[in-house]
Amino acid sequence: MPASVTHLVAGERILNRHFAESPQDVQGAFLAGCTLVDVHAFSEIERRHTHFVGTVQEDGEDAYLLSCANFLRGLDGLLMRPWSDLSPVERAFAVGYLCHLAVDECWKELGWQLFQKLGINSWANFPVPGDVSLTTFDFMSAEHLLDSPAVDAALGHVVIPDVFSHVPVALFIRQWSVIREYVLARATPDAHARMLELAGKSDTEVEESRQRHEAYWESSIELTQSIGGVGPFLQDGIDRSLQVLPQLLDRP
């Protein structure tokens, strides 16, 4: 699945459509919702619990296309309070969460394209280590931000609301403390190493990741460019988000 900066860039487009006139705390909550869903990356919580679906091996070929539908279907049971009782900040965070799931759903299609191009059938055979590939994709996605200072200003007003029952708000808060520097630095290899340090990884793990990034960085960029760069994926994620958002925004 794409990492936090890619989700942030897609989120900026949605923010400009639906939250452009909102206060910065609402904008910040929306962008936080877009970026913080992957709490499983640095905690014991399971990804199925946060993304409402398992892997292709577990749930079949259409697994990733179930995330948004499962989230929306179970939303009343996921919210701490009824949707009508939520504040604008709380609603914005929930909308950002849905956008994250929508962008994730598009990742499967990109993976299929990569597999076809490379003649492989598993991420285990991918020629670039996964952490390097995701950092590279994030780094290249950051170039598509329309107004980076405005995004940073909104992120400076992030308030993470206690709105969901399935993930303790403390995990979202910790996730932000871990990824914040990485997001603001726009996914440089050094920022990735710092993120691992903040997550409590060992010196050995951090150094091994540094070495992988140094060894594979240029080839990872070239590989991403060979499929047309990150732009087409970002547009697919934005389009999918806009497709599902009315089911949440139009709730009474």
Image (cartoon, rainbow, N blue to C red):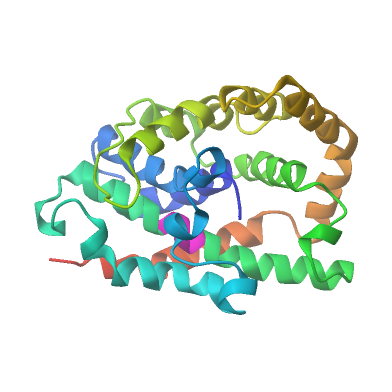
Whether residue 249 can be seen here: no
Whether residue 28 can be seen here: yes
Report x, y in % for residue 133. 75, 47
- Quadrant of residue 71 in the image? bottom left
Against 128, residue 193 (above or below) is above
Report x, y in % for residue 198. 57, 23
Residue at 62% x, 72% y is: 56
Classify residue 59 as left or right of residue 211: left
Residue at 38% x, 73% y is: 69
| Residues rendered magenta in the picture | 99-103
Against 162, residue 226 (above or below) is below
Classify residue 169 as left or right of residue 144: left
- Quadrant of residue 5 in the image? top right
Report x, y in % for residue 208. 81, 29
Residue at 58% x, 29% y is: 182
Question: Looking at the image, which is closer to me, 17 or 172?
Answer: 172
Residue at 89% x, 71% y is: 119
> Where does the C terminus fall, quadrant-wise?
bottom left
Report x, y in % for residue 20. 31, 45
Is residue 4 highlighted in magenta? no
Q: Main secondary structure of the magenta part?
A: helix
Classify residue 188 as left or right of residue 120: left
Classify residue 124 as left or right of residue 51: right
